[in-house]
Amino acid sequence: MDRRLQDRFSLDGQVAVVTGAAMGMGRETTLTLARAGARVVGIDRNADVMEETKAMASAEGLAWLSAHKRTMDGWMVGRISQAFCVIQ
């Protein structure tokens, strides 16, 4: 990506929560946001495919936390908060 364009649309210091992050448009959105500098929380009900997306992000060194949709309880919200300081 052109450096000027990248600077203009930088998401450094921002947090993005993406549902449906395991595949398709959700996966591409997740990876694009992370490449732009956002710390991404990816949520999906398909845990196996979510691991593939997480591996893709990790291979690029992108900030990432994934959650299986059915595990989104108080514990997971606390984990997200601690990992990314998103809840104030």
Image (cartoon, rainbow, N blue to C red):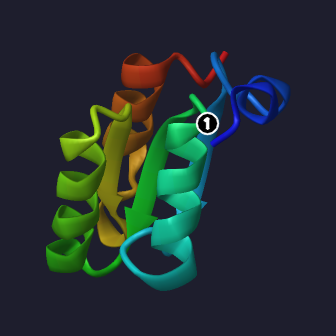
Question: Can you say whether 79 is above or below 13 in the image?
Answer: below
| Residue type indicated by callout 1 | Ala
Above-or-below relation of 44 to 33: below
Image quarter hosting the C terminus: top right
The foreground one among 75 and 63 is 63
Mark 1: few/some/many CA within 10 Å (<14, 14-19, 20+): some
Quick one: 88 or 57, which is closer to the camera? 57
Residue at position x 43%, y 55% in the image: 42
Q: Position of residue 1 (x, y in %)?
A: 63, 42
Residue for point 32% across, 39% down? 75
Residue at the spot x=76%, y=23% of the render? Answer: 7
Q: Which residue lies under the disc numbered 1?
A: 36
**Image location (x, y in percent) of residue 62:** 36, 35
Question: Dot 1: what SS?
Answer: loop
Side of 83 relative to 58 (left or right):
right
Residue plotted at (42% across, 33% down): 80
Front-lying residue, 81 or 12 = 12
State left or right for residue 34 relative to residue 55. right
Estimate the x, y position of residue 2 in percent, counting from the top left. 70, 37
**Quadrant of the rendered image containing residue 67:** bottom left
Q: Is residue 78 above or below residue 76?
A: above
When asked about the image quadrant of residue 16, the answer is: top right
